[in-house]
Each structure stands twice: as C-alpha cells, then as structure tokens.
Amino acid sequence: MLRADALRAIYPEVQDQIVVTIMGAVAAELYTLGHRTNFFYLEHAMGLASSTGLGIALAMPRHKVIVIDGDGSLLMNLGTLSTMARYRPGNLVHIVFDNGSLLSVGGFPTATATGTDLAGVARACAIPQVAEADTPERLKQVVADALAGETLTTIVSKVEAIGPKSFQMDLPLLENRFQFKRTLEALRQQE
Amino acid sequence: MPVSVANSQAIYDALKACDVKIISALPETWLVHLIRMADDDPKVTLVRVAKEEEAIGISAGAHLAGVNSALLMQNHGFLAAINPIVSLALLYKIPLLMLISYRGHMGERDPWQTQGGMVTEPLLRTLGIPIWHLSDPLDAQRRIKDAQTLAHAALSPVAVLLTRELMWEE
C-alpha cells in the first residue's frame, strides 16, 4: 500500500477532526490532499506528535484527536505508548504508517525492517485496542470504527517506502501553529 | 525524607492559583510531595511520563488546546528534554512553565548530581530561557505567577529553579 493512497482513503474520516502529524512525507501528502486549519504538522521534534496529540486529547476530552505517526518517529519515543496506555484517552486515535525506513532523511532502514513489531509493542504497552491495516479499505474501516468508539486505538499500517518528490509546503510553521490553536479554541467554545 | 511538605504545598498552591489543569512529572526525590498533591487533586490531570521529552509534547498540546499546564522535572530531566524544548517549544513559540528541581548545586552531597547541576543555568541561558530561582516559600505565589505570565506573553518556555533551600530540610 502507498501511504498517499492510505491517506486519500481516510481523508473523509479525518478532515473534520483534530489531526497532528509527524514531519516529512506524511505532512506533505496530507497537506497536498487538502489543508485544513484543524491539521497540525509537527515539522520537527521527531517522536513527539503522539505526545502532543495526547496533550490535546487530555485537554479536550469531548473531541476526537487523530495522530498520524511513523515508524521512525515512534521508535524515537517508544515510551509514549506506555504513557498513552496509562491514561488511555478514549478520544485519541493513533495511526502509525510503518514503511520500515527513515524515508525523509535518506531512506535508511528502521528496526521495523529487521523485525520490530510496533503493533506488538503497542499491545505489550497495554494500548487497549490495537489494529493492523494493510489495505486502504481496511484502514478506512478501522479508522471509522476507532472514531465511532470510545477506546484508545493504535493502528499500524505497513506502507511502501515511497514519498512525494518534495516535502515543501506553502505554509509557514508558525502560521499553521496559530491557525490550529485558533481552530481548537473555537471548537472548545462550541462545547 | 526531609523534603519540605510545607514548601511543596506553597508551590502547589501557587500552581493552582495559576489555573494549571495538567501537570506532567517524572518521579524525583525533591518532587515527591508535589507529585502526590497533583495525584490527589481531582481537578488536575497528572501525567506521569516515561521521559521528560514527552512532557514537552504534552504541554504543547495542552497549550494549543487552551489549557494551562506545568512541568515538574529534575534538572537532568531538563537536560533530557533539550531537543524538544528547541525543536518544539522554541521553534513553535510554545509557552512552558517548567518547575525544575535544582540538584547538584550548592550543598549537594551526591557526586552524581553535580555535573548536571553545574551546566543547568548555563544551558538555560544559552537557550534564552528566562530563569527564576525560588528559595523562599513566601515568593512562590508571586514568582510562579509571574513566570507563567511571562511565558504566555513571550510565548516562550520559562524555568523556575526549585533550590535546595526551598525543597530540602536538614
């Protein structure tokens, strides 16, 4: 499965949700599908998209929060799975695209290429619901199910190590940060 | 354990006066009472992190969602979190109210704490992070509130160094 196809499949599910992504291909591909002010692309601080999403989920329990993570990023912050599992916010959906590669920085293989099983790590950390989804149709279904439910879910999707030609986005990161915060403030005022 | 309960309470009361709703922490001797107070407080969400880096993300998320947070960490936790402080908090102009137990400074008997103690302030200054020392419990309300006010006005991390004089009774 191509990550771009996977993102296209879930775009209708995620477009109106609070979304936090990692840097690189994930951010560029989601941005290309259609930027929304409820999307925040964490363009550095590798590993912390999930922690940032956890902070939002704990602060806004009435709203769904989707984190779009990657294998390289998650491997940099495996402790996040144990922290998420400890507080298990039911409004948090954690999608991990696993391409077995640090694609944005030269394509070197990550430990998932040599056998580390992130879904297994998530289960062992006591994430209450862990799914694997390796086709766009299956991913769309498990994302829809996770959004409809009230259980912290980690979804691991194997994808090919192919990204966009360019990671450039016509969106300064501070503009993204301030518009995202304003959007969350407006969502909170609707409560 | 000669960690001051009364002074921990003064710090906790100051955080409550700042309307802090989320507190992240990693266990550390000087912080035990503060962590217990947060854990016992139904109006505060205590997030026990596995590593302090996570706490930078959690506080960033809380800020973006419009909720006040604070971080409890040892100075070695600050050292562990320098990359996200730079590449999330400073890069994205995220205010952080960091309460840092200042181990390894004057009066320290544990040799293993001393190297971190000696580099803490130089590193905070290098990062351009404003510093308050908190040594007198009577200053807790004012200094913690002022630190939060500056963090929000400057959209920057700020550090409140919790000194031995404040935290340790001997």
Image (spheres, coloured by chain):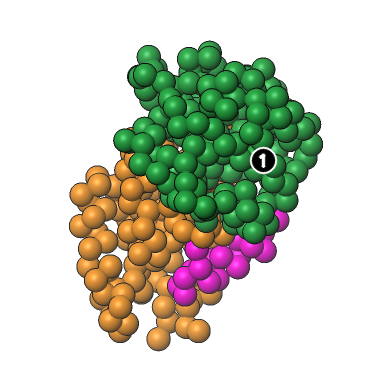
Tell me which residue sits at (65%, 29%) in the image. A135
Q: Is residue A135 visible?
A: yes
Residue B57 pos. (x, y %): 48, 44
Quarter of the rendering occupied by the C terminus of chain B:
bottom left
Query: Seen in the image, is A100 located left or right of residue A123?
Result: left
* Chain that the image shows in orange: B
Query: Seen in the image, is B70 located left or right of residue B115?
Result: right
So how many labels did they put on this image?
A: 1
Residue A15 pos. (x, y %): 62, 19
Q: Which residues are magenta?
A: B22-42
Q: Secondary structure at mark 1?
A: strand
| The one of B12 and B129 positioned closer to us in this rendering | B129
Tell me which residue sits at (53%, 14%) in the image. A33
Query: Seen in the image, is A191 located left or right of residue B65?
Result: right
Mark 1 crowd level (few <14, some 14–19, many ≥20, 10 Å Cα): some
| The one of B120 and A163 positioned closer to us in this rendering | A163
Residue found farthest to the front:
A114
* Chain that the image shows in green: A
Q: Is residue A34 above or below residue A56?
A: above
Residue A67 pos. (x, y %): 57, 35
Name the kind of residue labelled 1 in the image: Glu
- Residue matched to label 1: A132
- Residue B33: say if magenta: yes
Tell me which residue sits at (69%, 46%) in the image. A130
| The one of A33 and B95 positioned closer to us in this rendering | A33
- Residue A46: say if magenta: no
Q: Is residue B77 above or below residue B33?
A: above
